[in-house]
Image (cartoon, rainbow, N blue to C red):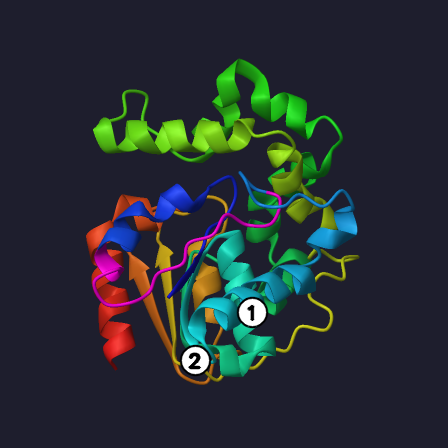
Amino acid sequence: MLLLHGFPDCWHGWARQIAHFARRFTVVAPDGRGCNLSDKPDSVAAYRLPRLVADADSLITHFGGGRPAVVVGHDWGGVVAWALASCCPKAVSHLVVLNAPHPAVLARALVADSRQQQASEYLERLRQPDAEYRLSENHFERLRWVLDIPPIPGAAESAYVAACVEAWSQPGALTGALSWYRANDFGPVGRAAEGIATAVEAPTLLVWGRDDRALLSHLALQHSDIAKRLTVHILEGAGHWTPREQPDEVNALIDAHCSS
């Protein structure tokens, strides 16, 4: 099982999934290219979506011994997971995507969906040259706000905050994470989705928090032309961070999907 995190997360965001699925799978939860202790190429072009897909495919080849993987992706990791399943179908046995649209669906939404356009206005701010400075102010206050971390976190959330702060503090890590946005523009003039196939053959589970403010939940219903075997589950009372907000429900849904 390959777990792909999003922004501004790190591998630790999958803690509850790692503990649960390690009983059944060999679980690999890497930090993405440029993040935490992973390699950090200097060129922004090195973070284009095809390169991110190649990273995931290489991990499956390395750890899977020729076997396909259950690929689970959240946020940016979900975008990569969609693209991987589209372009490398033999690498993916089952696909699970949490709160992330297929690149083609996102591109369509950023052209024609005014609600998603408004919700995605933050994308341009993350591409600005001063983004690192703004996001690191006050001990990464803005990034902690993005992660919906409560003002007085419990013990589990405190460990998660510490892991994230350590990841963000690695030399070059914040620039590496932001390079995903700087290298990939899905909007009207962007070409991030070019060359990414739009047909997914693997059985696909798409889980979305109803209250997601960044990627609106109605996007989940726009994938019928993408995945041939698609199940959509909307989580009530959850926002963008479904693996942390409702881990037991998410784990149960993934278990059932992989057993079908």
Q: Is residue 112 visible?
A: no
Q: Residue at x 22, y 28 (%)?
A: 155
Judge whether residue 27 can be spotted in this image: yes
Residue at 59%, 26% in the rendered image:
135
Q: Nearer the viewer, residue 192 or 57?
A: 57
Say which amino acid is labelled 1: Asp
Where residue 117 appears, as percent x and y from the top left, is 62, 49
Count neighbours of disc 1 (C-alpha within 10 A) and say few if under 14, some if 14 to 19, many if 20 or more: many
Q: Which of marks 1 and 2 is nearer the N terminus?
A: 1
Q: Quadrant of residue 259?
A: bottom left
Read off the magenta span.
Answer: 20-34
| Element type at mark 1 | helix
Q: Percent from the top left, x then y, of residue 172?
A: 65, 33
On the rendered structure, is 37 left or right of 132? left
What secondary structure is the magenta-colored segment mainly? loop
Res. 235 mark = none
Q: Is residue 235 above or below residue 123?
A: below
Q: Using the numbered discs, state the Cα–Cα distance from disc 1 to disc 2 in whole angstroms.
A: 11 Å
The residue that disc 2 covers is: 67
Q: Which residue is drawn at 35% across and 61% down?
A: 27
Q: In the picture, residue 245 is in which quadrant?
A: top left
Quadrant where the C terminus is found in the figure:
bottom left
